[in-house]
Image: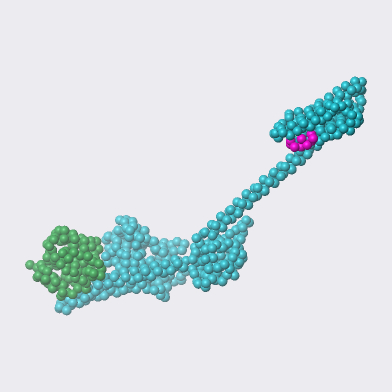
Chain colours: A cyan, B green
């Protein structure tokens, strides 16, 4: 019980005591000590006012206070001789206050003390009184009943109060926690928003119907959307993004992530720009596709740079080619010119024939160089594809090679559809490379095999091999390690392979040899040539 | 006795041409690359060397340097499809008696050789 309530109760108690004293049976003529007691009683309560709050929480203190009350009231009863009067009722008040304050444990001892004192007072006033008189049998048990009822009532009230308090505390805690969670969520949303806004690329997320749910500033910038386009709008309604949406739709419908794709779109300034795009479908909580998110980049700058680079490369090739052609042609030209000069003063037929044949060799060589240049430099032209038996073609090439043992395995029925002269040139260049790297009487192995998608031709030599340094420049035009090489052989090979949608892999180790694998795509064919 | 000339060129037709053009006046020896040229020069005496620059194995300029390490006086004529200025070829003039470009004017070549070593 708090100090405040206790003090209030006691003031009421004092007031009631004084009032009952005033209107007792004997009227106002009670003896002087009654006032003194009332005054002491009042002063005691005033003193209690100054007692620190903490003290009131101790049961012993409150018990002593109530004991003091009982004694005081008993004294009043004694002084005013009010045994038969209503003073007795004041015991009820004290016991009730005690039971409210301390429950049954506090009120019962008080009730016992009160009944003993009260019994003694009755006995003292009337020693012949019967034990069965109403003063004993009715009033004393009533004191205990009051203690019992009071404690029960206060206990249940206290329980209710406690429950209410707990409920309040719980609701306060809940409120606080909700506040914390809400703050955290706001923080998280801000953080996510910051991330999306600072991604170095455009981000657009849409629902399955195309409604934009997220749009970052970079996306707005790249697509030149301005301030008119906002989240909530449908991407299908934005002009020029047809191809963009198509890719997103594909991803949503198939549930497949699109990686590093490229589309051409028109931005809102009506400029066509290439866009590099990656798209991931988004699933909802029930694992259904609910939309997708696209990350994209404007590739126009990169494309422009690439174009510049290509142009520079072309120029550089052109320069190299010119210098190479000049040097390469001058050698056979020297022979032609020189032998022609010698012819002037030669009379022997045998010599004349020799010089003429040398002149012819020179012209053939120049022709070969021109062929190489044209193969390398030609633009895409219309080519005639025929069915080629790869093994027969390779056999026709290797039958002209002497001094080197060549074995060929497999592929008797491999029919590849391609342009025959290009494919012949491809294998001539590769086989020549191998042969030139080998000593006489070495062995060249050619294996033909097949996998799911390709005819694979393996050319394995045990020649000099290629250094790691040279491996990097293998397909660079005009790069050669051979004195008589044009530096175009492998460039031409690569070009032919690519034209036929195949691929080429070269592995080499210096001193051990080189393995070259040509993958030519399988195609349906009917007849072989 | 005929004066001896070493012709070093990896191109067979060029060696044949020089041989046919000069063999009436001089004794011609042939080398197919720089290394062979160095080897032959160390072994036998020559009055003149005609050498190409771009060759497999030992490069012509490298061969000239090696020959010069062994023989300071032997005249050397470079005969190349390269042009001195255009192709950034750097040769020490003290090392080389003449720089002849391909195609070759045989008459001019003969005159040059005559100027250097006589007949």
- Per the rendered image, the range of residues in magenta is A2-11
Picture coordinates of residue A114, whole percent (x, y): 83, 27
**Horizontal arrangement in the rendering, residue A77 relative to residue A196 (left or right):** right
Picture coordinates of residue A379, whole percent (x, y): 39, 74
Instruction: Tell whether position A3 is magenta.
Output: yes
- Residue A123 occupies quadrant: top right
- Which residue shows up at 74% across the image and 32% down it? A47
- Residue A361 occupies quadrant: bottom left
**Horizontal arrangement in the rendering, residue A204 relative to residue A97 (left or right):** left
- Which residue shows up at 61% across the image and 52% down it? A183
Picture coordinates of residue B102, whole percent (x, y): 21, 72
Which of the image's four quarters has the C terminus of chain A?
A: bottom left
- Which residue shows up at 42% across the image and 66% down it? A502
- Main SS of the magenta segment? helix
Instruction: Tell whether position B33 is magenta.
Output: no
Please tell me which residue lies in front, B4 or B116.
B116
Please tell me which residue lies in front, A248 or A411.
A248
Q: Residue furthest left?
A: B1
Please tell me which residue lies in front, A510 or A396.
A510
- Which residue shows up at 49% across the image and 66% down it? A298
Q: Is residue B66 above or below residue A326?
A: above
- Residue A443 occupies quadrant: bottom left
Picture coordinates of residue A358, whole percent (x, y): 22, 73
Q: Is residue A220 visible?
A: yes
Please tell me which residue lies in front, B80 or B97.
B97
């Amino acid at each position: 019980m708090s100090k405040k309530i206790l003090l209030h109760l006691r003031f009421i108690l004092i007031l009631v005591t004084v009032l009952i004293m005033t209107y007792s049976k004997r009227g106002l003529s009670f003896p002087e000590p009654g006032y003194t007691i009332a005054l002491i009683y009042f002063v005691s309560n005033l003193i209690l006012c100054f007692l620190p709050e903490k003290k009131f929480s101790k049961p012993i203190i409150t018990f002593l206070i109530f004991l003091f009350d009982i004694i005081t009231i008993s004294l009043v009863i004694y002084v005013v001789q009010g045994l038969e009067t209503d003073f007795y009722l004041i015991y009820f008040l004290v016991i009730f206050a005690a039971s409210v304050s301390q429950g049954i444990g506090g009120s019962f001892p008080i009730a016992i003390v009160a009944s003993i004192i009260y019994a003694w007072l009755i006995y003292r006033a009337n020693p012949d009184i019967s034990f069965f008189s109403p003063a004993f049998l009715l009033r004393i048990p009533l004191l205990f009943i009051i203690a019992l009822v009071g404690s029960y009532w206060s206990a249940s009230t206290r329980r209710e109060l406690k429950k209410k308090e707990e409920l309040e505390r719980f609701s306060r805690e809940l409120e606080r926690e909700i506040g914390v969670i809400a703050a955290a969520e706001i923080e998280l949303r801000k953080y996510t928003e910051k991330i999306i806004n600072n991604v170095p690329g455009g981000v657009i997320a849409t629902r399955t119907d195309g409604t934009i749910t997220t749009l970052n500033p970079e996306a707005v910038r790249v697509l030149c959307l301005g301030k008119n386009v906002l989240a909530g709008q449908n991407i299908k309604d934005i002009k020029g993004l047809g191809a963009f949406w198509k890719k997103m739709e594909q991803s949503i419908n198939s549930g497949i992530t699109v990686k590093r794709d490229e589309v051409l779109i028109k931005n809102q300034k009506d400029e066509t720009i290439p866009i590099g795009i990656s798209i991931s479908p988004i699933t909802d909580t029930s694992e259904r596709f609910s939309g997708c998110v696209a990350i994209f980049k404007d590739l126009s700058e990169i494309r422009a740079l690439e174009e510049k680079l290509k142009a520079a490369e072309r120029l550089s090739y052109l320069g190299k080619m010119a210098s190479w052609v000049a040097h390469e042609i001058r050698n056979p030209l020297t022979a032609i010119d020189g032998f022609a000069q010698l012819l002037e003063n030669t009379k022997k037929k045998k010599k004349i024939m020799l010089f003429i044949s040398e002149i012819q060799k020179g012209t053939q060589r120049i022709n070969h160089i021109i062929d190489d240049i044209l193969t390398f430099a030609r633009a895409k032209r219309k080519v005639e594809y025929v069915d080629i038996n790869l093994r027969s073609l390779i056999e026709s090439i290797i039958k002209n090679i002497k001094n080197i043992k060549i074995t060929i395995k497999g592929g008797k029925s491999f029919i590849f559809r391609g342009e025959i002269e290009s494919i012949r040139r491809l294998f001539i260049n590769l086989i020549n490379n191998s042969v030139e790297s080998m000593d006489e009487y070495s062995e060249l192995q050619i294996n033909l095999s097949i996998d799911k998608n390709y005819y694979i031709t393996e050319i394995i030599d045990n020649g000099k091999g290629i250094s790691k340094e040279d491996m990097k420049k293998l397909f660079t035009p005009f790069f050669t390690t051979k004195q008589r090489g044009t530096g175009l052989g492998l460039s031409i090979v690569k070009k032919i392979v690519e034209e036929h949608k195949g691929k080429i892999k070269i592995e080499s180790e210096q001193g051990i040899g080189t393995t070259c694998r040509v993958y030519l795509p399988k195609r349906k064919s009917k007849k072989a040539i | 006795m005929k004066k001896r000339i070493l012709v070093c060129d990896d191109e067979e037709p060029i060696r044949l041409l020089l041989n046919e053009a000069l063999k009436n006046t001089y004794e011609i020896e042939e080398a197919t690359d720089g290394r062979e040229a160095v080897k032959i020069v160390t072994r036998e005496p020559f009055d003149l060397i005609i050498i190409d620059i771009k060759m497999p194995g030992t490069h012509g300029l490298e061969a000239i340097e090696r020959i010069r390490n062994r023989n300071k006086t032997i005249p050397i004529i470079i005969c190349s499809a390269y042009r001195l200025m255009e192709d950034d070829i750097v040769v020490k003039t003290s090392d080389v008696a003449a720089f002849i470009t391909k195609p070759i004017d045989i008459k001019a070549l003969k005159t040059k050789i005559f100027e250097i070593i006589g007949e």
